């Protein structure tokens, strides 16, 4: 089989890239090692930046998002037992965020690609990359026990943090920056009305908690816990009790427990590789970088990468101009590092840290106090939270 761009991974990055390339008349094949059912059910974050929403809508895959997504103009920061609203839209020039689960974006993209005759190979086994630095790279895999090969001009490595694309680059060619946090989030999805129509990020001396939502009847709730915590040691009653404590007295009345549909642990990591390219292989999304979940930036950053890549590939195919592809890594990394900074800062601000003791906690409260009282500080927060503008 031959295509212009072979894409490894059918997460948001790979699917959106395939869609954006299709709109530009560039052919691609997406090779995914999981089943369609698996990737459509995989629960991840659910906050879309304004730029992500605009791009999904402009590119024709935003109909359901527009109908079902919940537009949020603010959020709450809760500390010292009291809530403080940040008026995101008022501070960030009318921009907002939209609550819409990542797996819904994945479903919308898969159905758009398939409706347009797009080629997505699910359940591909033993995916491997060949000749990434030569003029004719190839992707090999097995499907139904038959060996297959895709010849292409370029490979997009969109196969997430644990994929094979980054690992196919000789280690000496990349610089990795990595920090693993000593805590994690215990996340649950519960059939319970959200405590508030807006997200609540909660600083507490028992640890961080996040009260998020998926729909007006589905809550998505997170508790800071140890990195090696066993979710089995958190029966439902213990989770509700801990959420109640971290929400604090004056928010408690609103917490109405309901059946838990899912429970899992999310590790916290800041990770970047530089450059995001080797020869004809371009890395995008989680394959190149991971942010801790505190700012909900992972999906948004993946979409920003593939937007840059699609524009650069169009310049290459339409005008024979290699300049934008050559700048791909630098263009993406400028945004990646600004978003890493914000995500690491939010993580550090809101979590209970073992090191630093009472002094650190007291300084966190002072910073939160400043953030919620100073229009300048709140504006900087809002500008980052709703998403920085795309650079070209
Ligand atoms: N071969 C083919 N596909 C693979 C392989 C492989 N060897 N390894 C992994 N994959 C697939 C995964 O099954 C997954 O569907 O690659 C896809 C990667 O998707 P994501 O992990 O979702 O990564 P990405 O598309 O970059 O999306 C960004 O933002 O919210 C965060 O981490 C969250 O998924 C999210 C990400
Ligand atoms: C989520 O809805 O799952 C979510 C929201 C905000 C975050 C992280 C996750 O910062």
Image (tube, helix red, strand yellow):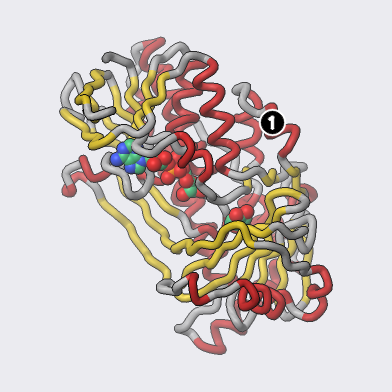
Q: Quadrant of ligand 1?
A: top left
Name the element at disc 1.
helix
Q: Is residue 109 visible?
A: yes
Residue 301: give x, y in percent of width and height. Answer: 50, 43
* Among the 4 quarters of the image, the one containing residue 197: bottom right
- Image quadrant in which you'd find residue 247: bottom right
Q: Is residue 176 left or right of residue 244?
A: left
Badge 1 residue CB within 8 Å of ligand 2: no
Q: Nearer the viewer, residue 303 or 367?
A: 303
Residue 192 position in % (x across, y down): 74, 60
Left or right: residue 250 versus residue 39 is right
* Residue 342 vertical position relative to residue 244 in the rendered view, above or below: above
Residue hosting label 1: 64
Q: Nearer the viewer, residue 136 or 35?
A: 35
Residue 241 appears at what percent x and percent y?
67, 78
**Residue 157 x, y percent position in the rendering:** 33, 35
Front-most of residues 256 and 112: 256
Residue, x 47% and y 83% (percent of image)? 354
In the displayed structure, would residue 154 be above or below residue 51? above
Quadrant of the snapshot with the N terminus: top left
Q: Residues within 10 Å of mark 1 (few under 14, many from 20)?
A: few
Q: Is residue 383 left or right of residue 311?
A: right
> Residue at position x 61%, y 45% from top?
101
Say above or below: 193 vs 31: below
Residue 305 visible in rendering: no
Which residue corresponds to the image point at 45% horizontal and 11% vertical from the top-left? 25
């Amino acid at each position: 089989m031959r295509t212009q761009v072979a894409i490894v991974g059918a997460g948001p990055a790979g699917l959106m890239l395939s869609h954006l390339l299709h709109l530009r008349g560039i052919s691609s094949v997406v090779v995914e090692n999981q089943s369609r059912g698996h990737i459509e059910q995989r629960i991840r974050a659910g906050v879309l930046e304004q730029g992500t929403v605009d791009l999904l809508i402009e590119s024709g895959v935003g109909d359901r998002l527009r109908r079902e997504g919940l537009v949020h103009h603010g959020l709450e920061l809760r500390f010292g037992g009291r809530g403080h609203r940040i008026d995101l839209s008022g501070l960030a020039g009318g921009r907002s965020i939209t609550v819409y689960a990542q797996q819904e974006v994945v479903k919308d993209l898969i159905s758009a690609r398939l409706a347009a005759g797009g080629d997505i190979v699910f359940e591909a086994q033993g995916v491997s990359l060949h000749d990434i630095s030569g003029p004719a790279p190839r992707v090999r895999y097995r499907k139904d026990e038959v060996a297959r090969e895709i010849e292409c001009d370029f490979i997009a490595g969109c196969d997430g943090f644990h994929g094979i694309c980054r690992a196919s680059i000789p280690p000496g060619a990349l610089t990795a920056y990595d920090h693993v946090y000593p805590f994690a989030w215990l996340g649950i999805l519960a059939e319970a009305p959200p405590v508030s129509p807006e997200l609540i990020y909660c600083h507490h001396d028992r640890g961080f908690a996040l009260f998020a939502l998926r729909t007006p009847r589905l809550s998505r709730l997170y508790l800071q816990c140890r990195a090696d915590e066993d979710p089995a040691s958190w029966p439902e009653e213990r989770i509700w009790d801990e959420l109640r404590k971290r929400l604090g007295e004056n928010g408690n009345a609103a917490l109405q427990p309901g059946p838990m549909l899912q429970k899992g642990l999310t590790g916290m990591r800041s990770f970047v590789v530089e450059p995001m390219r080797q020869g004809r292989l371009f890395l995008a999304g989680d394959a190149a970088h991971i942010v801790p979940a505190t700012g909900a930036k992972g999906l948004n950053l993946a979409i920003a990468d593939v937007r840059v890549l699609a524009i650069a590939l169009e310049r290459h195919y339409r005008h024979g101009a290699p300049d934008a592809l050559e700048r791909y890594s630098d263009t993406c990394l400028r945004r990646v590092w600004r978003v890493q900074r914000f995500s690491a800062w939010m993580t550090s601000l809101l979590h209970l840290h073992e090191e630093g003791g009472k002094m650190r906690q007291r300084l966190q409260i002072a910073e939160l106090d400043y953030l919620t009282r100073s229009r300048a500080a709140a504006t900087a927060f809002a500008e980052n939270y709703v998403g920085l503008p795309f650079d070209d």
